[in-house]
Image (tube, coloured by chain):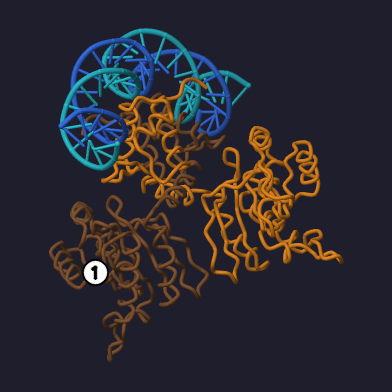
Chain colours: A orange, B brown, C cyan, D blue
DNA sequence: AGAGCAGCGTCGGCATTGTCGAACGACGTT
DNA sequence: AACGTCGTTCGACAATGCCGACGCTGCTCT
């Protein structure tokens, strides 16, 4: 893996900077943040602007991301085979369970949501497609880390933030749970990222049984989990686990995976 | 406007090629299509792959768009000021009218959809955010070409496909209608892109009264248009026009446009 | 099975090309 | 009115990316 193209690496860094930081960044900010000369940063930004990847506010002169990225992102979804195959099954799962359904793939240090079916009865939701979720505290992430060595490696490198009191951040504990996930074939996350939210996820494999993504069901603890006698949340409902696993199997089969 | 960075231009061309063409492209295809040496194309693709902008199928070796584009596209939406301001108004418009609502901006030779509110009663819809619509045959496009000289210039350059029997492709006729649109302040498109679908759109301006986008209402002809005595579709319903224009005014005001 | 082929990846020489720093003009501020 | 800041331009240097030829692997055809 020899040399990469320097100007491209820098352009990508600029795009990520614009995506991560404030709404708009001035040329000097960009140059400073990346340790580039102003002229250099300007040349890259000018080209990115010509190509539509960044836009410039005519008054302030500041730069922000461009519309072409949205168009290309949409094209990515159009081309995405896993997503295309999963559309109908995810829909079914949402309708049968009455809960929100996510479809995610490993991307860098997190799970990228590539499909999102709204909960049928609820219209007031934000579309999560294109956003990232953590590896260590979501059902999607746990499935991927359990079955994909690359994901597990990324998890080790990433900082594991404790979002709630239930978040598990200790690596050994995570590995232990991953072993359980591998054994039983599905993962859960109950109030580990958002309080009040529980999720169940199962693995999707391609024709050579490689892990390529995961499908998850998300919902309020009260509906997803059974209630203990003392009022606290018990284990997740077995029938929901069955539905999620069936959906994952169906998608895998559509991708050409052998029966199992 | 002096020199642009060659390798960036080529990288952008590769991304567009991957977005436009087949699902996956081989290295030779890319090199051929752009007239590059294989080694050159490979260097660019390798860097794009490292940055996550393209992915490579391990078996076939073919390349396709990468997940990072989806993430950046989502960031574009997060940063987009017009979209942020319009969210609540577009929602209101959809709820009040019971129809689908689009929010679009000019991008290259078309209208890029940056927001899409589903028709309240209907769940079976595809999200159109990130896709492009033609300038000459949609209400969104007509509004933009009428008020934005850049859009009108792009329209002249673009080929105007006749999607239905009602599509207007003659430039003079389009200009004449644009004059009407400017006069009355809104545009309509009845079965000019999709048969059975009618839409109404109005302009959104920023604080300096520059056209920055348009909001549109889409629905079946039977509901959007009044019925003529002979059963054919008549003019669009005036009360819907009022709703659309009020939404556009509200969004413009949120963007800082002076009252009007 | 062997040979042929087509595809991706790599390597080194050459010059093109991107990089850098300084200077310019335009704004807005002190 | 002088200063500071910002985006942009320009020219020289050399680092950098481009090119074409050469391995290498996997597949197909004979």
In this rendering, the count of numbered labels is: 1
**Which is more toward the observer, D29 or A143?**
A143
Q: Is residue D22 left or right of residue B137?
A: right
The answer for which chain carries disc 1 is B
Residue B65 makes an appearance in the image: no
Report x, y in % for residue A102: 61, 56
Q: Residue under circle 1?
A: B260
Q: Name above or below for residue B244 compared with residue B228.
A: above
Residue A173 makes an appearance in the image: yes
Q: Name above or below for residue A141 compared with residue B58.
A: below
The quarter of the picture where residue C6 lies is top left
Q: Is residue B136 left or right of residue C8?
A: left
- Residue visible at 72% across and 52% down in the picture: A189
- Which quadrant: the N terminus of chain B? top left
The quarter of the picture where residue A150 lies is top right
- Which quadrant: the C terminus of chain B? bottom left
Instruction: Identify the secondary structure beneath mark 1.
Output: loop
**Which is more toward the observer, A229 or A100?**
A229
Report x, y in % for residue B23: 46, 45
């Amino acid at each position: 893996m020899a040399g990469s193209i320097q100007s491209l690496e820098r352009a990508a860094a600029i795009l990520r900077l614009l995506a991560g930081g404030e709404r708009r960044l001035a040329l000097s900010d960009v140059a400073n943040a990346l340790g580039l000369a102003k002229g250099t940063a300007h040349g890259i930004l000018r080209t990115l602007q010509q190509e539509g990847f960044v836009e410039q506010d005519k008054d302030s002169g500041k730069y922000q991301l461009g519309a072409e990225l949205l168009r290309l992102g949409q094209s990515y979804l159009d081309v995405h085979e896993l997503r295309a195959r999963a559309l109908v099954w995810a829909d079914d799962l949402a309708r049968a369970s009455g809960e929100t359904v996510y479809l995610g793939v490993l991307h860098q240090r997190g799970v990228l949501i590539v499909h999102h079916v709204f909960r049928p009865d609820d219209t007031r939701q934000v579309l999560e497609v294109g956003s990232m979720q953590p590896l260590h505290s979501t059902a999607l992430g746990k499935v991927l880390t359990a079955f994909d060595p690359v994901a597990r490696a990324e998890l080790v490198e990433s900082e594991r933030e404790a979002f709630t009191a239930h978040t598990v951040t200790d690596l050994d504990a995570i590995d232990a749970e991953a072993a359980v996930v591998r054994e039983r074939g599905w993962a859960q996350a109950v109030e580990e990222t958002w309080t009040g939210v529980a999720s169940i996820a199962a693995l999707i494999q391609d024709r050579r049984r490689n892990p390529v993504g995961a499908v998850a069901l998300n919902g309020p603890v009260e509906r997803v989990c059974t209630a203990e006698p003392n009022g606290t949340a018990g284990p997740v409902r077995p029938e929901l686990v069955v539905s999620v696993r069936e959906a994952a199997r169906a998608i895998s089969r559509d991708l050409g995976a052998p029966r199992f």
